[in-house]
Image (cartoon, helix red, strand yellow):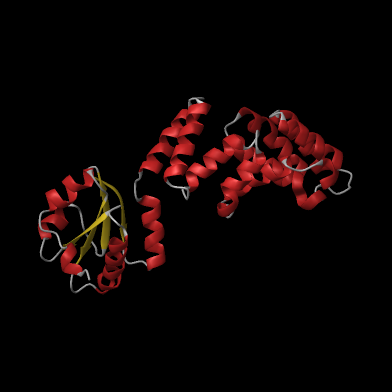
Amino acid sequence: MVSTVDFEVKDFTREVLEDSHNVPVLVDYWAEWCGPCKFLGPIVEKLAGEANGKWKLVKVNTEEHPAIAAEWGIRGIPNLKLFYKGEVIDEVAGAMPEADMRRWLAEKLPSKAKALTMEAAKLLEMGKIDEGVAKLEQALREDDSLQQAKVLLARQKLWQSPAAAMALLADIKYLERAREILLIAEVLSKKEADFPAGTAKAEVWQGLEALRQQDFAKALEHLIRAIIMDKPYADELARRLTIALFHYLGESNEITRAYRRQFDMALY
């Protein structure tokens, strides 16, 4: 059974700075007199024991190693610093419950999958879609829980395979950026008969037909007319879909800018 002493620092340069080139190192700055440290300490030690080598824990007692604490700017404890490639890539001050600690680590720990996702995002920005998609698919083979990769890949799958986009986002629909892509994917998957009768139905359907061709300007024209005709239609589908499209395109996109004022006027 591991204990605090198993993680105590002996050689900071070797155990943290050098080792962090091979594996992320979480440094826990603490002291015996610190109540929150005693709450947090067992949590990080438990998680380190479960890490199976994905990251390692080093604890620094600031009373015994004041020079190290001063060198790394420790003004309050507990303080956690995450080192990677010899640098601090993130940190958190104060104690947190185990569930929050797990979420923080899952978000902040570097990984091959995260690196692939970053590479993919750059390729997509450069218009190298096929290469970017291949990187995203590789990232998800490495880590099929990576939300950023799922959202980026769903954006690319959306027009050719709405069902594939929905499958990618099924377990992260609580994220706003995922919900909006899901909304677009869901309506693209529908048939005309799936929509309720109403004065705005024809405009909504024509908007979806334009959307399938990725003619965003024409789609927005129809959707805004649908809002003017019957805003409540299908639980305000035209309004929700227009907002989703604006966010998909981005607020700086020229189509968003061109139709944003018309949309605002249609609402009021």
Left or right, residue 76 beside residue 160: left
The x, y position of residue 131, in whole percent, is: 48, 28
Left or right, residue 202 beside residue 4: right
Kindly tell me whether residue 251 is visible in this rendering. Answer: no
The x, y position of residue 122, in whole percent, is: 44, 31
**Which residue is pictured at 80% across the width and 40% down the height?**
204
The x, y position of residue 176, in whole percent, is: 58, 50
| 63 or 126: nearer the viewer | 126
The x, y position of residue 79, in whole percent, is: 26, 60
**Which residue is pictured at 57% across the width and 40% down the height?**
154
- Using the image, determine if residue 43 lies above or below residue 153: below
Kindly tell me whether residue 256 is visible in this rendering. Answer: yes
**Which residue is pictured at 51% across the width and 33% down the height?**
133
Number of numbered discs: 0
Q: Quadrant of the N terminus?
A: bottom left
Left or right, residue 131 beside residue 195: left
Left or right, residue 155 beside residue 202: left
**Which residue is pictured at 28% across the width and 70% down the height?**
42
Instruction: Specify the farthest residue to the top.
Output: 127
Residue 8's quadrant in the figure? Answer: bottom left
Residue 174's quadrant in the figure? Answer: bottom right
Residue 181's quadrant in the figure? Answer: top right
